[in-house]
Image: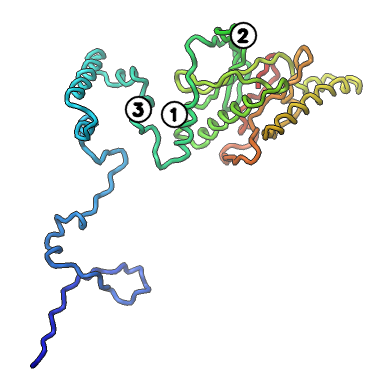
Amino acid sequence: MRRFRSRPEPVLVQPVDQGRAAQPKALRRVRPVPLDCRQRSDNHPSFNQRKPVPQGQCADPRSLLTHLEHAGALTSARRELLEALANEALAARQGNAPDVLASLGETAAVSRTFGTEVSPTSPERVATANEDRAVPAEREGQYTRLGELGRGGQSVVRRAVDEFVGREVALKELLVSPESADASPSESTARQRFLREARLTAQLDHPGIVAVHELARRADGTLFCAQKLIRGETLKARFARCESLRQRLELLPHLIDACDAVAYAHSRGVIHRDLKPSNIMIGAFGETVVVDWGLAKKRGEAEAVDASVSGSSRRSRCTGPRWEHRPI
């Protein structure tokens, strides 16, 4: 008897990328697929890949309230209550949605509520947002700003009065706004450096290092730190007025005091990296204080270098003419 071979199962073929020169054939064999599956491939989920959602659009067209209700996180009664409150708020502001948003704390506060303030694919922005959220808001009526003491490329120093305790302080404010810090990498680096400087200096509890009283943010998000107001002049200015060797030797105790302060910082693992006579303040009663810790860093700490900013503009301190009441 003659044996009949079974008919082979049909297979699919598909063109191969012409750029793949390693394969000499223009067609290649793929895994066999049943005919009935091919016939309904238009409706089969394994054959229909979801198109990527354009940026700024939501993959789910349902409203947030509908999504929460279907997920069981919101009852129908509570949804009606939320909708009534929203309509009431819109009616109170003549249907002006931006005014309603402002009453809730602007977009940033609403974004923090729903966890969409920063992109999860941007670790740097997530870290910056977490650091900003850790900074408390300025208490209303605490500081009365009096006058400007100095200004630099990224910060300004003002003399102020802490109304809660009745003392004069120096307020150092960052000139970089939160919105521009999110848009510009260089300004985001300046914001992180400002936070690092304030926190590092606050950890150094020594009479020869300027004291940081508070780190906070204003209502518009501007970062500032309140520091001890130092009344005096720099060691550099004192050296310039010396006319004899004896007068210069009289300043030696101040240099020794500055070395003691820096040695204490080294014992805490903090390196100043910008120590010079212009960064050593001499008070009216003989006190010596090391200031300008803008370039300081922890030993072993990685540093983000901003190549777009060079020279002295990398420092967040205020530079310029000598003033009588100089902070950090």
Residue at x-position 57% and y-position 10%: 162
Query: Residue 243's quadrant in the figure?
Result: top right
Residue 20: where, in percent of width, then height?
A: 36, 69
Q: Earlier in the sequence, mark 2 or mark 3?
A: 3
Q: Which residue is mark 2?
A: 167
Query: Residue 61's quadrant in the figure?
Result: top left
Q: Residues under labels 2 and 3: Cα distance?
A: 37 Å
Taking the image as shown, residue 191 lies to the left or right of residue 68, namely: right
| Residue 179 image label | 1
Where 262 falls versus 165 (above or below)? below
Q: Crowding near pointer 2: few (<14 within 10 Å), some, many (20+)?
A: few
Q: Earlier in the sequence, mark 2 or mark 1?
A: 2
Q: Earlier in the sequence, mark 1 or mark 3?
A: 3
Amino acid of disc 2: Arg
Secondary structure at numbered mark 3: helix
Taking the image as shown, residue 214 lies to the left or right of residue 35, namely: right
Residue 65: where, in percent of width, then height?
A: 22, 29
Q: Residues under labels 1 and 3: Cα distance?
A: 18 Å
Q: Nearer the viewer, mark 1 or mark 3?
A: 3
- Disc 2, disc 3: CB below 8 Å? no
Residue at x-position 50% and y-position 24%: 135
Amino acid of disc 3: Thr
Residue at x-position 37% and y-position 24%: 109
Q: Crowding near pointer 1: few (<14 within 10 Å), some, many (20+)?
A: few
Q: Crowding near pointer 3: few (<14 within 10 Å), some, many (20+)?
A: few
Residue 140: where, in percent of width, then height?
A: 47, 11
Locate the N terminus and report the quarter of the image it occupies: bottom left
Taking the image as shown, residue 295 lies to the left or right of residue 81, namely: right
| Residue 113 image label | 3
- Disc 1, disc 3: CB below 8 Å? no
